[in-house]
Amino acid sequence: MDRYTQQEIRRRRTFGIISHPDAGKTTLTEKLLLFGGAIRRAGAVKARRAARHATSDWMTIERERGISVTTSVMKFNYRDYEINLLDTPGHQDFSEDTYRVLTAVDSTLMVIDSAKGVEAQTEKLMEVCRLRNTPIITFINKLDREGMAPLDLLDDIEDKLQIECVPLCWPIGMGKRFRGVYNLYRRQLHLFTPGSDTRQRDGIVIHDLSDPLLDDLLGEQAGELRQDVELIEGAAGPLDMQQFLTGGQTPVFFGSAVNNFGVQEMLDAFVEMAPPPGPRRAVSREVSPYEEAFSGFAFKIQANMNPAHRDRIAFVRICSGRFRRGMKVVHHRLGKEITLANATIFMARDRDNVDEAFAGDIIGLHNHGTIKIGDTFSEKEPLQFTGIPNFAPEHFQRVRMKNAFKAKHLQKGLMQLAEEGAVQVFRPVGGSDYILGAVGVLQFEVTRARLAAEYGVEAVYEPVDYRVARWVSCDDRRQLAEFEKANAANLARDSQGRLCYLTTSDFQLQYCMKEWPAVTFHKTRDIV
């Protein structure tokens, strides 16, 4: 591999942002774009009727509710680092798209509300990060409001998420007494100016906390800061980069995203500490990002980003080598050679054609239904990257057509939404109805809205008794045939034709598992 390509790969930082709803994630995302020069003014996420909406929220339902439903991919440059930022949905009723996008990143930024601490959604997202031991940096937000004591926040994170916290800065007060943060690893004081929406100047350098200048600047809070720093440096262990890179430690920063405070300090540390693209596991072997040959996989499909053009974009994570416009690659699931002539990069709703891209980058490929989640593209050998999962749905609805003449529209819309990962679609083995399955119930509302707006489908959505789904497999064909015959009323096929067991409760599932010990019940399943 030539030196230029190696340098470009080392400059890449590809990360996702995770949080519970209303922790300030979308606001933080926009401030990061501001520092990267990708936007000139951060959007406001304040009310349904706000004149401007967050740059990273493009779907109508997102703008109306002020929440992120889909995953946005945004690219910008900062301090000679090339940043690929994936803004995942934070709403509690999100989709497995949120889970899956975390398989395409090299690190994660976790946003915590200082008043609420760790919330349920953050715990669920952390489970996904643990599947791949993803490095995590933590930003504790909203210090300009009253919240939990900083030490209590660290205890909350360690207790609920089972990860060691290493604070790299420390807040001085909070709410009305919030004066700023002290950068522990650079020995710099950053003072807070309420209402500031501009980039902060360099911090005041305080090499020694006994410096009288600290008292002049902070008054009685100088003594509190000295006590806190002494306590933290005595109690908290030092940052161990190996522990951080394997998900055992999280560096912690404090700030206020809405006031643009503490964001740049966190971003500076992030680009220095977060790993560049690393090796990716395929079925046959491990693939290094520094291999000469191009390879990548599709982790997300988004239809109709521009409704006027009915377009479908496949989001592809480049795993190795270099992309060049017009290059020929093999689409391995189809066994066909294709030309990548019109790849794009993303800045939320804006897109630009791209002439070259490198391992770690996210590019968009236009397609007409030929690309599915998990598809692999490479220049040479056939590869199938692993760890791109389907997750068992937790909520279910039956869908019936109002107009029988629109049946084909319904089928087409459901299959395309299933390919995107927006919803899972099941057909009962003994029936013709469609059963929709989702990780979060908001996905049903998204599905209804998109079927109506994009496919002209009006349907009736009914509750169904199912509460649990598991994919089933069995090495013994005779045993599997007997299982299918005995449980036909509870079996369905998903959109890829895989057999799935649907039931009303965990109790019923456990009973069935005891009755059929030779059958394996899968909560997740790699996409192949």
Image (tube, rainbow, N blue to C red):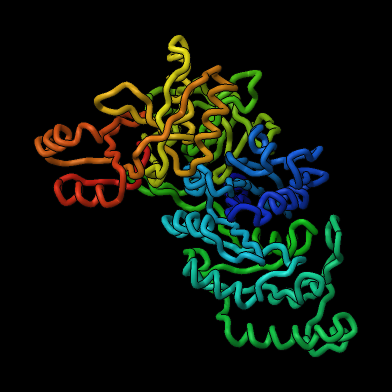
Left or right position of 147 against 50: left
Q: How many labels does the image show?
A: 0
State the image coordinates of residue 347 (x, y, percent, origin top left): 69, 38
Name which quarter of the figure residue 166 lies in.
bottom right
Judged from this view, the residue extending furthest toward the right is 216
Name which quarter of the figure residue 500 lies in.
top left
The answer to whether 463 is drawn above or below residue 430 in the figure is: below
Quadrant, the C terminus: top left
User: Which residue does the image show at 75% across and 72% down from the upper left?
Assistant: 174
Q: Nearer the viewer, residue 170 or 45?
A: 45
Q: Can residue 177 be seen in this view?
A: yes
State the image coordinates of residue 59 (x, y, percent, origin top left): 64, 33
State the image coordinates of residue 393 (x, y, percent, origin top left): 40, 42
The answer to whether 437 is drawn above or below residue 149 in the figure is: above
Left or right position of 243 against 181: left
User: Which residue does the image show at 69% across and 31% down from the upper left?
Assistant: 352
The answer to whether 262 is drawn above or below residue 26 in the figure is: below
User: Which residue does the image show at 53% across and 28% down from the upper left?
Assistant: 448
